[in-house]
Image (cartoon, rainbow, N blue to C red):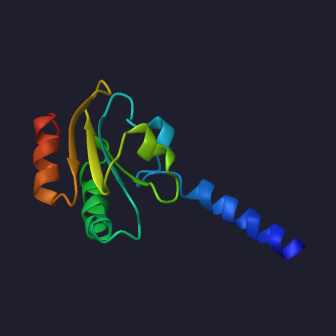
């Protein structure tokens, strides 16, 4: 019984720890206030999502302080999928500085396409 309780506690802690985006932003604080935000809603076990992971990490570093790049795993926490009306993963949602959704894309999105979308929102 004690072992089952320990496993349950570990599972809950894991879910809490993994409910933040790539930039460490909790799902509820997306979009980031006053900053252009790209949210990638996917799953760490989804093949196109895995292909995008290194791109997102690279862009997160490149745009640090200029734009928020956030990954949310909707298989770990389905609430963001419901909140943003996701029908397929991965889905990328772009928000302007005012927090208004301005663009949405479903499926794999290349680095070049993400950069172009961020540039349209004024991020250099």
Above or below: residue 113 compared with residue 79: below
Picture coordinates of residue 99, whole percent (x, y): 32, 28
Quarter of the C terminus within the rendering: top left
Where residue 9 appears, as percent x and y from the top left, is 75, 63
Identify the residue at image location x=75%, y=65%.
8
Image side of residue 82 versus residue 124, left or right? right
Q: Nearer the viewer, residue 93 or 58?
A: 93
Q: Classify residue 13 as left or right of residue 64.
A: right
In this orientation, which residue lies closer to the viewer: 51 or 67? 51
Q: Is residue 122 left or right of residue 93?
A: left
Residue with the most extreme top position: 98
| Residue 1 position by quadrant | bottom right
* Residue 124, visible in the rendered structure: no
Of all residues shown, which one is farthest toward the right? Answer: 1
Where in the figure is residue 35, as x and y percent of width and height? 31, 33
Q: How many marks?
A: 0
Q: Work out which residue is located at the far bottom of the displayed protein and give it.
A: 3
Residue 48 vs residue 97, the one in the foreground: 48
Q: Looking at the rendering, which quadrant does residue 102 occupy? A: top left
Q: Position of residue 92 (x, y in %)?
A: 27, 48
Instruction: Say which of 104 and 58 sits in front.
Output: 104
Report whether residue 74 is seen: yes
Residue at (42, 46) in percent of width and height: 81
């Amino acid at each position: 019984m004690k072992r089952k309780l320990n496993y349950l506690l570990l599972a809950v802690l894991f879910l809490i720890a993994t409910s933040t985006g790539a930039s460490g932003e909790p799902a509820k604080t997306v979009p980031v206030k006053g900053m252009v935000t790209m949210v990638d809603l996917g799953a760490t076990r989804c093949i196109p999502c895995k292909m995008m992971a290194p791109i997102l990490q690279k862009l997160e570093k490149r745009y640090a302080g200029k734009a928020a790049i956030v990954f949310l795993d909707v298989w770990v926490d389905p609430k963001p999928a419901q909140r943003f009306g996701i029908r397929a993963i991965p889905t990328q949602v772009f928000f302007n500085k005012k927090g208004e959704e301005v663009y949405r894309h479903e499926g794999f999105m290349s680095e070049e396409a993400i950069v172009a979308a961020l540039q349209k929102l004024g991020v250099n």
